[in-house]
Image: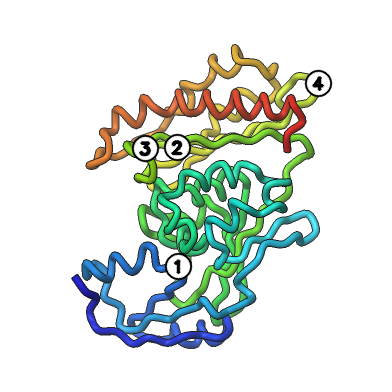
Amino acid sequence: MKPAPFEYVRAASVREAIALLDHDDAKIIAGGQSLVPMMNFRLAQPERIVDINAIAELSGIREDGSDIVIGSLVRHAEAMRSPLLARHFPVIAEAMHHVAHLAIRNRGTIGGSLVHADPSAEWPLLVALLDGEIVAEGPDGCRTVKADEFFVAPLVTEIDETEILVAVRFPKPAPGAGMAFDEVARRAGDFAVASAGALVSVEDGVMREVRVALGGVGDGPVRATAVEEELTGRVADKVSISDTVELACEGLEPETDIHASAEYRLSLVPVLVRRVLERAVLRAGAGAA
């Protein structure tokens, strides 16, 4: 199929793009990996498309004091290759290997993935896991939103129709923190049936900070707070981890769809949580950042 007729405009700055969004039915296009297929199937029929690819300020990965800032136009493949992200957040490159296929990783953007808000996507999970903040800019200026407020429901976010997601800010982790990501999909490149990420800081053989995030098992990314609380302060070993992974299922009510049943998704959660926690602890113990 082909999309319905629409007006195409290309913005040269964030302020121009925001002004162009002042329309009854306007959508932003960047990588187009989600929007274009939806338009082709006429699931989305915007009257105006605002292309933001020419806005240089939305590109690049940089340090800003104690934070790492990733522009919304950064492509998945660029994040996967970034030396700066590899130094502070190697889990990002690990997760990017699971994003769809090469063509989509080369074209798809971080901002597009976050705004699309697919519960099984990797970037929403990473923002939740790494305590990131989403930066949005609109007619009234910039604001930041945490992951637990940004992701409202599947394919629904807190961002306003007059705003643009301009960047994501990640606080630098403690030195020597170990990280890991894993997911299960029916085939390589398919949507994740379930996914998990972990960040663990170890001091004197004890887990001082533990973060665990899950994807594909809720309306958006989910922090496994019961696991985090139980493991914090415990000895960093496989026994401690095995004793607590079942807690990750508390409160989860995953959906059944064409990819997997709710029961199967729930059965995957403890397995994935165990994998990422053990790997994160190992990397923390080896001094891997």
Q: Answer yes or no: do the residues labelled 4 and 1 have beta carbons within 8 Å? A: no
As drawn, which residue projects farthest toward the left? 1
Question: Marks 2 and 4: in contact by CB < 8 Å?
Answer: no
Disc 2 element: strand
Pointer 1: residues within 10 angstroms few (<14), some, or many (20+)? many
Judge the density around disc 2: few (<14), some (14-19), many (≥20) Cα neighbours within 10 Å: many
Mark 3 or mark 4, earlier in chain: 3
The numbered mark, 4 or 1, whose residue comes first in the sequence reads: 1
The three-letter amino acid code for the residue at tag 4 is: Asp
**Closer to the observer: label 2 or label 3?**
3
Q: Amino acid at mark 3?
A: Ala
> Which comes sooner in the sequence, label 1 or label 2?
1
Is residue 203 depicted above or below 18 in this figure?
above
Q: From the top left corner, tell me how far across and down residue 182 is, in percent.
A: 50, 35
Q: Position of residue 235 (x, y in %)?
A: 70, 16
Q: Is residue 184 above or below residue 147?
A: above
Q: CA distance from mark 4 to mark 2?
A: 29 Å
Circle 3 residue = 185
Question: Along the horizontal axis of the image, is 198 left or right of 89?
Answer: left
Is 251 displayed left or right of 36 in the figure? right
Whether tag 1 and tag 2 are in contact, CB under 8 A, the answer is no
Badge 4 density bin: few <14, some 14–19, many ≥20, Cα 10 Å: few
Task: Point out which mark residue 195 bears.
Answer: 2
Depth-wise, is mark 1 or mark 2 nearer the camera? 1
Amino acid identity at mark 1: Gly
Q: CA distance from mark 1 to mark 2?
A: 24 Å
- What residue is shown at x 53% (from left), y 68% (from top)? 165
